[in-house]
Image (tube, helix red, strand yellow):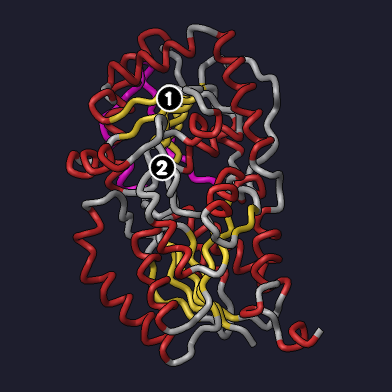
Amino acid sequence: MKRVLIAAGDPSGDLYASMLVAELRRRSPGITFAAVAGPLTRSALGPGDEFLEDLASLGVTGFVEPVRRLPRFARLRGRLDALLARGGADAVLCIDFWGFNSTILEAARARKVPAYYFISPQVWASRPGRVARIKKCVRKMLVIFPFEETLYRQKGVPVKWVGHPLLDLLPTPRRERPLTDPLRLGLLPGSRLSELRRHLPLFLSALGRIARDYPSLEVTVFAAQPLPDLHYRRLLAGFRLPGGGRPRIVRETDYAERARQDLVLSSSGTATLENALLGLPMVVVYKLSWPTYLLARALIKVRHIAMPNLLAGKALVPELIQHEATPAGVAAAALGLLEDPRRLYALRAELLALRELLGGPGAIARAAETLLAEPALKSPLEALR
């Protein structure tokens, strides 16, 4: 019986970890897990598994904020090192969340436990020197973008492009869809409390300006699973649309409501790729604490920060970064799209075309198949074949 230590530290990583746990167990029923992840992974675990700690719900992001969590991370790192030292895992599987997962990789290397990495840190965006550490610690990278496979192969790192797991989750959108009346506008302020507090008030202020031209707006706030409704209600208290209505708070796992939106205001992150694959025109905001932003500005080497723009190699959707992210700026970008239907429809088509770059559905199945073919995870009977 093989046992895997699986580590994911943010909501999207928690989602993909839960999907991998289910697929690995389906293919290899005897496999067990010890997990550092979040509530979705916890719910996917079964008898014989162990849930060690919920990292995904902490909402740690950026460069400066994790410093506040160092004592907790150090204690957890000690627990995981002890687990590896006593032979509590046959393999380690890290998912994204480089800062903490890099320490797990080092511990696995010291204990001679094979380690694998699903969803690469963005070494192509900043700090490419991390590839050298990955090469020392990781038996195989399982990457979600095709250009990542090329990058790692050129550096001599074993790698497999499996495609993007979002295509296992997202519905196939309609290619043609006119604007609705009333206009539907979605707000995606982020999955962490710090993002919510920075972005939702900004979006609400921008709404006041947008509603002058579209007074019958229907506004939906898409809530992140780790954040209770209480946080959203506090920030929405007292806000009214011109017609007297209030934004709705929606939680969903099937993306059906989001797919109905005409336009979304979105924080940067996984949500922008979800929007793109649904064909949703968007305005993207990237607003951080100033210390974190200044560090990021010094380190990030790519021209764009929204994943649709990175994949397209051009500015498909408006990006408003830090000081540009003002209510007037967000409103102007949104109205610039809404007032030009031909531009809006062309943007929708270009966003949907990005689906062809991501390998098609089946990423989780391909990742599980790749992992189970590794010597460290083969069952005894398979190893004899």
Seen at 51% across and 66% down, the residue is 41
Question: How many circles with numbers are drawn on the protein?
Answer: 2
Query: Where in the figure is residue 34, as x and y percent of width and height?
Result: 49, 78
Q: Which residue is mark 1?
A: 283
Q: Which residue is mark 2?
A: 125
Q: Quadrant of residue 374?
A: bottom right
Is residue 217 visible in this depiction of the protein?
yes
Instruction: From this view, report whether residue 206 is shown above or below residue 370.
Output: above
Query: Where in the figure is residue 285, as x and y percent of width and height?
Result: 36, 30
| Amino acid of disc 1 | Val
Query: Where in the figure is residue 1, as x and y percent of width and height?
Result: 64, 88
| Lower sequence index among marks 2 and 1 | 2
Q: Secondary structure at mark 2?
A: loop
Identity of the residue furthest to the right in this view: 385
Instruction: From this view, report whether residue 373 is shown above or below residue 194.
Output: below
Q: Quadrant of residue 319?
A: top left
Image: magenta residue range:
229-252
Q: Secondary structure at mark 1?
A: strand
Seen at 30% across and 43% down, the residue is 299
Instruction: From this view, report whether residue 95 is shown above or below residue 198.
Output: below
| Amino acid of disc 2 | Ala
- Residue 225 is left or right of residue 252, and the answer is left
Q: Quadrant of residue 44?
A: bottom right
Identity of the residue furthest to the bottom in this view: 86
Q: Which residue is nearer to you in this view: 12 or 88?
A: 88
